Image: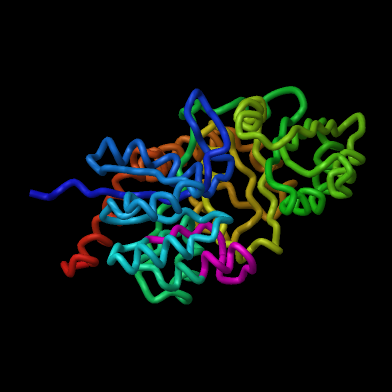
């Protein structure tokens, strides 16, 4: 009889409350450890989450070591002391990687160092599989980010009124939108466009100023602060989700979470990064430019609705918390067997 596995997750301090439950603002934690803890427990895995500011005390009193497998979340914390203590105690450690930490400095470089020493690595995207495999000696396991919220029916797809577009992202990605402003102006000449940007730069940010300056009678621009709840509320008022390519981030091993979240919300993403998202070609969302993508989607409503339905079926099978929990349990059981000297 298989004994229930005890999985301990080491993660950043919780800093957010959603629906009465503590959560994390960073997607690299919220959509992974945060999303999978409860469904893993429902599968019989005994899950313990230890946040960063409690790790040292747990290490001193010995309660840190009460686990079969340890999963380290990617975060800014320096996990070296905990990692070394766990390895000295003979505990298998899995390091979670959500970006190309192997080309980073600072906190990213610290995570890369631990990943190279870990018993196994989990990665959040298909591009990261090869990036990590070239850097680490242990096994690399793909574990997608989880989608959030409920599955929504497709939206209106721009049937009438202005074309309602939404773009969301952190400030380091906003340059991709400013680079596409001419395309949005061209769209607006043919039909009014209402653009909503959900982002986090200060009001004085020059890139944000360029976006606001592009507004006129044909192109309205609304800028909202980056908060998960804000994005969730406004995506359902949009026709299409803009995902322009940011070449400077192309090697970052982008997760599918943005594309998945758009489809899951019943909205069609216009994606111009063919390198990172080539495996989504079957959902008709990859285009040479935002202009081409929006123009195509406005004229192909039936194809857009079919693509949303197909993508949602794929997400339901592979990227919901419940579906991912089965994959996660399989990964951690494999790590435990390997550590115990069994067949990997």
Residue at image x 27%, y 35%? 42
Reply yes or no: does residue 27 show up in magenta.
no
Whole-percent x, y for residue 314 in the image: 40, 43
- Quarter-of-image position of residue 295: top right
Q: List the single residue furthest toward the left.
A: 1
Q: Is residue 122 left or right of residue 185?
A: left
Q: How is the image coloured?
A: rainbow
Read off the magenta span.
94-112
- Quarter-of-image position of residue 267: top right
- Quarter-of-image position of residue 242: top right
Residue at image x 51%, y 36%? 23
Q: Is residue 155 left or right of residue 184?
A: left
Taking depth in this image into account, of 15 and 277 the one nearest to the observer is 15
Does residue 203 sit above or below 280 in this rendering? Answer: above
Taking depth in this image into account, of 321 and 28 the one nearest to the observer is 28
Residue at image x 52%, y 64%? 111
Whole-percent x, y for residue 331 in the image: 30, 56
Whole-percent x, y for residue 325 in the image: 33, 44
User: In the picture, which quadrant includes the C terminus?
Assistant: bottom left
- Residue 157 visible in the picture: no
Q: Is residue 268 left or right of residue 87?
A: right
Whole-percent x, y for residue 28 in the image: 53, 49
């Amino acid at each position: 009889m298989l004994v229930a596995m005890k999985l301990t997750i080491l993660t950043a301090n919780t800093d957010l409350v959603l629906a009465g439950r503590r959560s994390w603002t960073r997607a690299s934690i919220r959509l992974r450890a945060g999303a999978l803890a409860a469904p893993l427990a429902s599968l019989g895995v005994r899950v313990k989450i230890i946040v960063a500011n409690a790790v040292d005390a747990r290490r001193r009193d010995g309660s840190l070591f009460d686990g079969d497998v340890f999963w380290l979340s990617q975060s800014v914390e320096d996990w070296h002391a905990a990692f070394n203590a766990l390895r000295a105690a003979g505990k298998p450690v899995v390091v979670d990687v959500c970006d190309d930490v192997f080309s980073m400095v600072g906190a990213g470089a610290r995570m890369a160092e631990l990943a190279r020493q870990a018993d196994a690595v989990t990665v959040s995207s298909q591009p990261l599989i090869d990036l990590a495999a070239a850097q680490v000696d242990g096994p690399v396991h793909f574990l997608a980010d989880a989608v959030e919220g409920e599955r929504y029916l497709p939206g209106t797809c721009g049937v009438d009124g202005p074309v309602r577009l939404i773009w969301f992202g952190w400030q380091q990605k906003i340059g991709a939108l400013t680079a596409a402003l001419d395309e949005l102006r061209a769209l607006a000449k043919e039909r009014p466009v209402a653009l909503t940007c959900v982002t986090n730069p200060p009001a004085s940010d020059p890139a944000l100023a360029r976006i606001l300056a592009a507004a006129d009678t044909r192109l309205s621009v609304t800028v909202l602060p980056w908060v998960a709840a804000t994005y969730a509320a406004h995506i359902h008022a949009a026709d299409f989700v803009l995902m322009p390519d940011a070449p400077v981030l192309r090697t970052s091993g982008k997760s599918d979470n943005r594309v998945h979240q758009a489809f899951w919300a019943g909205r069609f993403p216009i994606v111009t990064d063919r390198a990172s998202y080539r495996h989504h070609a079957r959902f008709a969302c990859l285009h040479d430019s935002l202009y081409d993508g929006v123009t195509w989607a406005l004229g192909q409503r039936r194809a857009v609705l079919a693509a949303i339905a197909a993508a949602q079926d794929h997400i339901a099978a592979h990227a919901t918390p419940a579906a991912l929990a089965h994959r996660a349990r399989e990964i951690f059981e494999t790590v435990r067997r390997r550590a115990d000297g069994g067949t990997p």
